[in-house]
Amino acid sequence: MAPSVASDGRSHSLSAVLPLLTGALWRAYRRDQLPERVLQFGSGMLLRGLCAAAVDTANRAAARAGRIVVVQSTAEGAPRARALNAQDGLFTLVERGLSGGAPVERVGLIGAISRALTADDQWNVVRDVAANPEIQVIVSNSSEAGFRIDAPFPGRLTDALHARFSRAPEAPLVFVIPTELVPDNGPRLAAMVRELAERYDRAQTFRDWLKARVRFCSSLVDRITTAPPPDQHAALEATLGYRDALLTVTEPYALWAIEADPAELRTVFPVESATVVFAPDIAFYRERKLRLLNAVHTAAAPLALLAGVRTVREATVHPLLAPFLKQLFKEIIPATDLPAGEARAFADKVLERFANPWLEHEWRIIATNQEEKFRIRVVPLISGRAQPDLALAAAAHLLFTRAPLESLGEAARIPEFARAARGWMALLSGGSIEAALAKTDRCT
């Protein structure tokens, strides 16, 4: 376990002269003897902190999970791809947080990534990788907005699979595991790919191959990852003794639940652990995380931003937002089908995760694609029962996104809820954010 690092004025100057992280610092296992087994669309912190970490852990245990080829699809992510290649696929994972109220800190070097490719410039190479019979897992993480048939990712995935069909039709099964936070992401991605496959395949041979040779597996990822602020980044580098452009800070908690035939998936992706679950049905894990973490984030983000609160941690000690977060759980849990006892225990764990003193989890980042997230995560929880906190959250959401009440769909047609939301909007529009929070605290 690495010691905690206090930032000082020397950190920035020290980091400027430190050597770059490269393969020369790697000691854990023979990376060059492991085949490339995973094609990963996305190079962001979540996949680094969960998928790459899981594969690395399996490799360290001699499970030979293989290595990951990363595909960077967006122009803004191209610097990450360049950094991965400059660092020989290595990055540092720093786990910091609370467990039962006690601080936990672990620092490790992750070596599961072999190389990074950019979709715009190296698509032919991506197709070559997809056609390699040793590739048996494809993982993706695009935004909710990017998980649509008219977005680039589904088309690129379809083309990559067509390359495999054309060049290696007898290759082993390939498991496609999307991690996007949308319900039933496996079947939804499968439907998009099959529709797009019609462009290649009037005789249906490609679509028949997809049905026989590709398994689309829903999955659920749960781990909060953040980029450390510049001063913390520099301080960590000073302690590590090298520069790492991809240094990733995450919480100790992690869960990756993958819906598949466990025995079938184990043969090609041996990464099961306490934090990676293979199960025939992951509905419980998905509902628990979607409603008791994601929905709470999305419901609270506009209100926190309107109140001038920057991070989730700051909200957990705010005199008005902290009680609001707790009350949200009391309204959300009865609106789910989750067992009440398990839901309350998970909610307590989430509140501890929110209070993590080492994560700078900003509300402005959480509020990205706010309108679509609110529709998927929060609106299904709205009912005719008394829900003053959810009504206040909806009002803040509508003001923040400048969307009409009708954008809430069925919820907008519940008279009591619509009336409460309009009342909160009038109060918030007058700048009385603290008054609204104080009022809902008294109502609950």
Image: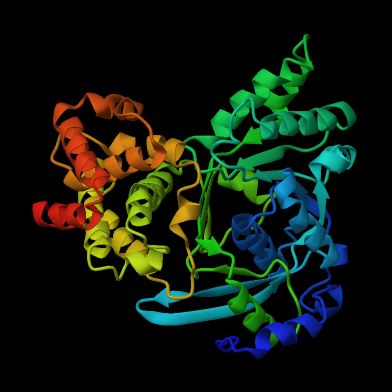
Seen from the viewer's position, the closer of residues 20 and 15 is 15
Q: Name the residue at 72% across, 34% down.
A: 157
Rendered location of residue 335, percent (x, y): 24, 41
Residue 145 occupies quadrant: top right
Rendered residue at 62%/45% (across/down): 141
Residue drawn at the location 47% of the way across and 63% of the way down: 361
Where residue 331 appears, x then y in whole percent? 21, 48
Q: Is residue 24 left or right of residue 309?
A: right
- In the rendered structure, the answer to whether residue 260 lies left or right of residue 60 reads left
Quick one: 22 or 307, which is closer to the camera?
307
As drawn, 322 above or below 10:
above
Residue at 19% across, 27% down: 414
Work out which residue is located at the far front of the displayed protein and give it. Answer: 430
Image-based side of 388 in relation to 89, left or right: left
Q: Is residue 337 visible?
A: no
Q: Is residue 246 above or below residue 239?
A: above
Task: Give x and y (percent) for residue 228.
Answer: 58, 70
Q: Which of 151 and 179 is in front in this view?
A: 151
Q: In which quarter of the image is residue 22?
A: bottom right
User: Which quadrant holds the N terminus?
Assistant: bottom right
- The picture quadrant where one finds residue 135 is top right
User: Looking at the image, is 400 positioned above or below residue 162?
Assistant: below
